[in-house]
Amino acid sequence: MSKNIKGNGRHLTMSDRIYIEQELLLRSSFRSIASALGKDPSTISKEIKLHSTVAPNGSYKTPRCVHCNNFKKCKDTVMLCGTCRDFCWGCSTGLKLARDCNDYNPFSCPKLYKPPYVCNGCEELSKCHDHKKYYHAKQAHKAYEEALTASRAGINMTPDELQELNDLISPLILKGQPLSHIFAVHSDEIPVCRRTLYNYLDQRVFQARNIDLPRRVRYKKRKRQTSPKSRNIEQVYRNRRTFKDFERFMEAHSDLDVVEMDTVKGSRDKGKCLLTLLFRSCSFMLVILMPDCTQHSVITAINNLTDAIGLRTFKKYFPVILTDNGSEFKNPWDIEKTESGTHRTYVFYCDPYVSNQKGRLEKNHEYIRYVIPKGRSMYKYTQDDINLMASHINSTSRDGLNGATPFDLAELLLDKRIPALAGQFRIAADDVCLKPSLIENNVSKRNKSTKEGDESNG
């Protein structure tokens, strides 16, 4: 097979095989067929040899002696040659059984041993008494598809290799790690692609199952919305802070970073919730536990963050904040300025019902829901528990970051004091856990130590 022919490495299609069949009827050479299809002549030759079919000549009553080279000069026209029990054309009674013939010499057409190897387009087809050999495009393509499916069926690994892969993959999946993170960290150790690994999970050859993957089972198809719902929002807090204003502002200040802000609630009852801040440049997320989801709690959290990292650092890394239209964010004036009135950031709002305008943060919220399922109250959590969860989330490799983690990029793009002052620390790749047990174990240990302390004091 010539490597210089463009497209020669691709498989033949149904249209290619129809063209081959038509050209064989016209007695075209393999070289001309290959030139028209952009293939090597040996490709056409192999295709015809591999996918040609044999069609027996005549009906089931056709005698075997017709295929003998000595048929025309044979004098024994009463009985059949060989062991077949059919009756010869020359048999007058039709009751005599066939007997062995020492002169039986089966005929074989020499044209089938040289190109085109089939009877398509043969001029002596009507005179030939031999079994016919044809190339049919439809049958050839069906045989090709069956062979392709059979070659890819089953598991292309030995039991020992499969067990080794299971020992590597299953413990990480059971920790809640997504496959994107596993492949980014162990790409050199995994001998198959991600699609193959999903197929193996479907076939239940691993200890881990589909239900152990974060989104494999419960993800449902959403209704596609062609255009955002129109809603007339004429409120003072959005004045000069709409998404269009945000786009115009970023065109004029393209060097500024953007931080996306939102909240994550626990149960429907009023109680503790999370304030999330994500740096677009590196997908690094800060998570702050608030006592409730109110404007006062949001402003207090922003003020505490400013005091922790310093006003100068805050102005450098939080120059623009993009958030949604939640009631807790409807006081942009106190968010933009410190308690003393010093300006520290600019606040803009997404359009109603268009969450993809801050899609990176919405995507990151999925990692939070792996650890804190929707509807679970956060009353028993502390900021240390939330910092631990955020550390594991920011240590997870992302496809969108080319296999890197937010921690990797934060070291290059952010002040090193920000993760440290936020109480976050890097987690080893294989130790990343995105399951509720991550912080539930901390809560259990804390409650146990508190109970033991109360008993000792009592």
Image: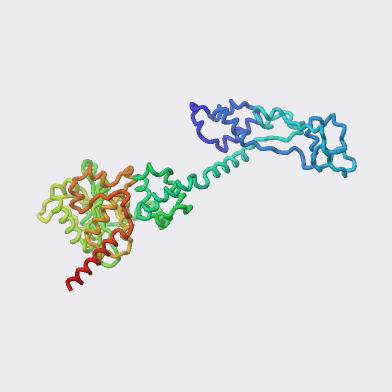
Q: Quadrant of residue 72?
A: top right
Residue 324 appears in view? no
In the depicted view, which residue is nearer to us: 54 or 388? 388
Residue at (33% x, 42% y) in the render: 402
* Quarter of the figure with the C terminus: bottom left
Q: Residue furthest bottom?
A: 458
Residue 25 in the image, given as x and y percentages of width and height: 66, 31
**Is 21 placed left or right of 374 in the picture?**
right
Q: Residue furthest right?
A: 93
Residue 200 in the image, given as x and y percentages of width and height: 46, 50
> Compared to 53, does 266 lie above or below?
below
Residue 378 in the image, given as x and y percentages of width and height: 27, 64
Residue at (43% x, 44% y) in the render: 193
Q: Quadrant of residue 438?
A: bottom left
Q: Quadrant of residue 13?
A: top right
Residue 12 appears in view? yes
In the depicted view, which residue is nearer to us: 409 or 138? 409
> Compared to 106, does 250 lie above or below?
below
Residue 176 in the image, given as x and y percentages of width and height: 35, 55
